[in-house]
Image (cartoon, rainbow, N blue to C red):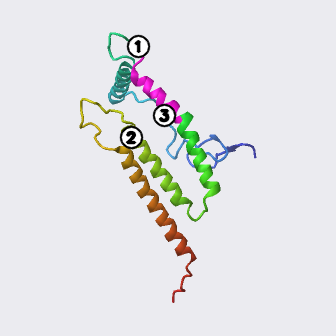
Amino acid sequence: MNDVNDVNDMKGTKGVKTAKGMKTEKGLKGWKGLKNKPDMSGTAWARRGFVLAGLAMIGFALFGGGAPELSTSPYLKFVAEVTLGVLVLVLPLSLAVGWLIGKVVPVVVRPIVQGACLATALIVMIALPSVLGYGRDATLPSALPRNYATGLWTVLAVVWAGAATLIVVRIVRRRTPKEPTR
């Protein structure tokens, strides 16, 4: 038998050939043309119009938004910088840390260390703008009034203390012999 199966023996199909293992689209009642015709209803045209209007608004906002100078918007620059930052810095760094954890950390405690590393990365990402002082204004003393570096180190110490506690508990539970249940 070749790659095309003859499906004459199926009910409701007459001489339709399909690729090996595929079902025919012709069912018991027969095939009434293409099943994937484009929707031409009023709702479908309205949806297409809304999508086009939305795309036009996004393009308008990204490329100046009606400003007298129609240069590239700072938002587009920001999106490009973030994308490059993720691809050049964050992705290789996370792959390297993951590889290092896989090589150095024992299997028993690996999930705990991975979770603590993930929590650390997220906390640092959220707190970094405050720690670096972005948004601080000398004329507004209530903007960023705390020592955020101390707060960041305190939160990270709590995360890693919790991870260390979980590691100790896991190792102790693993080494204690379990009593047989009766």
x%, y% of residue 154?
39, 53
First-in-chain label (1 vs 2): 1
Residue labelled with disc 3 = 36
Q: Which residues are magenta?
A: 72-86
| Residue type at the position of mark 1 | Ser
137 vs 113, left or right, is left
Q: Please state which of residues 32 and 139 is positioned toward the viewer in this rendering.
A: 139
| Amino acid on which disc 2 is placed | Val
Q: Is residue 13 above or below residue 69?
A: below
Towards the viewer: 44 or 125: 125
Residue 6 figure quarter: top right
In the rendered structure, the answer to whether residue 8 lies left or right of residue 89 reads right
The label on residue 158 is: none
Question: Could you tell me which residue is drawn at 48 percent across and 51 percent down?
Answer: 118
Q: Does residue 138 appear anywhere in the picture?
A: yes
**In the image, which is nearer the foreground, mark 2 or mark 3?**
2
| Disc number lying in front (1 or 2) | 2
Q: Is residue 23 visible?
A: no
Q: Looking at the picture, how far across and down is residue 84, in whole percent? A: 52, 30
Q: Residues within 10 Å of mark 3 (few under 14, many from 20)?
A: few
Viewer-nearest of discs 3 and 1: 1
Vertically, is 152 above or below 138?
A: below
Instruction: Assess whether residue 79 is covered by the magenta stretch.
Output: yes
Tell me the distance, in whole angstroms, between the alpha carbons under discs 1 and 2: 32 Å
Position of residue 129 in the picture relative to residue 83 (left or right): left
Disc 1 crowd, CA 10 A, few/some/many (<14, 14-19, 20+): few
Q: Residue furthest right?
A: 1
Residue under the point 67% across and 45% down: 20
Q: Circle 2 is placed at which residue position?
A: 131
Looking at the image, is 164 positioned above or below residue 79?
below
